[in-house]
Amino acid sequence: MPLITRSKKQEARNKKQEARSKKQEARNKKQEARSKKQEARSKKQEARSKKQEDDPVKSKIMFEPVILKNINASDSYTLTAYLKTGGYQALKKALEMNTDTIIQMVKDSGLRGRGGAGFSTGLKWSFIPKDPTIPKYLCCNADEGEPGTYKDRAIIEKDPHQLLEGIAIGCYAIGASNAYIYIRGEFTLGADRLEDAIREAHSKGYLGNNILGSKFSLNIYVHRGAGAYICGEETALLESLEGRRALPRIKPPFPALVGLFGKPTVINNVETLACIPHIINRGAGWFAAIGPAKSPGPKLFGVSGHVNKPGLYELPMGTPLREIIYTHAGGIKGDRRLKAVIPGGVSAPMLTEKDLDTPMDFDSLAAKGTMLGSGAVVVMDEKTCIVKAALIVHEFFHHESCGKCTPCREGLDWIVKVMRRVEHGEGKERDLDLLLKLCGDIFGRTFCPLGDGAVMALRGAINNFREEFEYHVKHKRCMAGC
Amino acid sequence: MLSEGAVKEINDLTGKYANKRSAVMPALFVVQREYGYVTEEGMREVANILGLRPVQIFEVATFYTMYNKKPVGKYHIQVCTNISCSLLGANHIVDFLSMRLGVKVKETTPDKMFTLSTVECLGSCGTAPMMQINDRYYEDLTKEKIEEILKGLK
């Protein structure tokens, strides 16, 4: 080979080498910047936790559980155990109070419905007509079905008397002498515990005729559902209680005027009712002082997914999401980074790392375009494929759509079909826009919030992780790292 | 035919409600317990007892997933595959059970002992992955734990 060619080749090789080392240098610089950022981040984190330690009011670890205070005792579900911790004292106190005073007290406490909608409980009670000749009902919504949620089950299984006492006070306040607990069919143990608790309470005069020597009489019945998420919607629950398919009713009329068997009815969630005895015992002011002024009180947060200590945590409303995940639930498994978190059951649009300082209360989460819902925190780490997660959630909504309204029934069918092909690597370029268009065709066009919930969840996933959806369409597989 | 005890039970159920029709759902659970699943015969008997038209029973039975419209095995294994359980490997649990029992999802073993199903969220997300066998919850599942559970089911 001529010498000249060889030296040219050598030159080229040298140039390549040079380029390579330049690249390496750039890479090193980037790495440096990254570790600097990392350092800054950990410093911030440290400062934040120090601040929390310094401020005892902010340090929610000091918070004494209220609703879950009894659940660690092995016999917590018995009447004996409940009476030992002051059980049924609130009912006794309430029966000596004027019913309007009780309703005002619940209003003043600022208690908002823990089922997800966050409506003022006292206000809801005040809508019930006062006419004593009209029968009235209270239904406890124990159809806990929002994926990620398992808080009501804990109250029912571990402290059923707390719920019964709340129901009894509610019934006294609105003038109802019959109440139904609509419990999801799968909670067999819970239904048995409630039946036993009702029997026990009857035998000691806390339920039945002339409760504790008063003129107030009450019967509480347990009604088991049979596997339909839609029954968590209050009017569907009433249809189901009347022995029909659980298709939501159009509102108005609202259940407060035309509810169960056509009579005025209050429907309250389990956790909401469990707060009532404590408000009566400790006062509206005590309750209102816990957490943010506009959405106060203790709240159960059920953490699940990729955390070290999944579980149920009772904390003041307004506790930051970061504290729930990193302080209470022990952080992300395997020290991975957080990718997404659903803050309030799967209908709530997901948040990302940048939102971790959001206080977990009705208004703060609404301001972030999501919702507190049931307080079910589902944590997903950096390896999670968001497209797959969204498909799982939408297979659920599709399965649970009751079929009454066309936009939800047909729309969710289409959404799932399109999402399946995107997830399976058969997506087309226009599919993302098609999904968003379908969302628009469902949102606000249905009798009940099921369709809206599905749409909000999907929009949240696409808006936060559009590039992952696009990657699935383009490369026919999950984005690297998933 | 429903047993005398079951008929009495259904009649007694009506006392809980202002409307007899409300007893349809609990009555269908009685039918399922008696026959193993909700049979057409059982549903017609409920209609008779409650003074309703048979279609008023059929429409309820077909709406709710917990009423089995077909026979299931002695042990009905239902694995939750919703989000929290899926994040923690519910699909491996389903695959393992499918391999171990030799049936696919929605199938029953030839000896009629086991039916394998997947199911939507059962409210046990803090102890995921989980499954339900008949009425009982089994939580924090691992393959080893499932082996132990299956050994106990004869």
Image: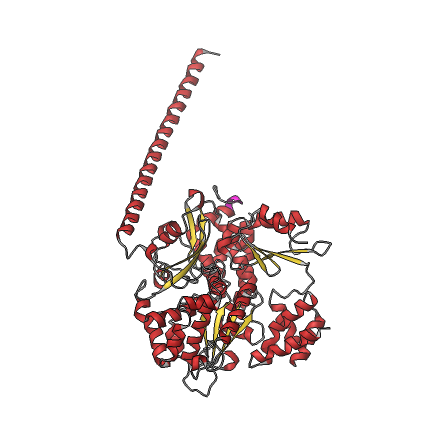
Q: Is residue B25 above or below residue A313?
A: below
Question: Which residue is nearer to you in this view: B154 or A426?
Answer: B154
Can residue B148 be seen here? The reply is: yes
Horizontal side of A50 relative to A81 (left or right) equals left
Q: Residue at x 68, y 60 (%)?
A: B72
Q: Residue at x 57, y 81 (%)?
A: B19
Question: Which residue is nearer to you in this view: A403 or A255?
Answer: A255
Which residue lies most toward the bottom here? A133
Residue A318 screen position, x and y as percent: 34, 60
Count of numbered circles on the image: 0
Residue A112 screen position, x and y as percent: 38, 68
Q: Which residues are magenta?
A: A473-477
Question: Which residue is nearer to you in this view: B41 or B75?
Answer: B75
Q: Is residue A104 above or below residue A155?
A: below
Question: Which residue is nearer to you in this view: A30 or B22?
Answer: B22
Q: Residue at x 43, y 87 (%)?
A: A132
Q: How is the image coloured?
A: secondary structure
Based on the picture, tell me whether residue A264 belongs to the magenta stretch: no
Horizontal side of A427 relative to A286 (left or right) equals right
Residue A82 screen position, x and y as percent: 44, 67
Based on the picture, tell me whether residue A474 belongs to the magenta stretch: yes
Residue A283 screen position, x and y as percent: 32, 71
Task: Name the quadrant containing residue A225.
Answer: bottom right
Task: Name the quadrant containing residue B77.
Answer: bottom right
Can residue A448 be seen here? The reply is: no
What secondary structure is the magenta-colored segment mainly? helix
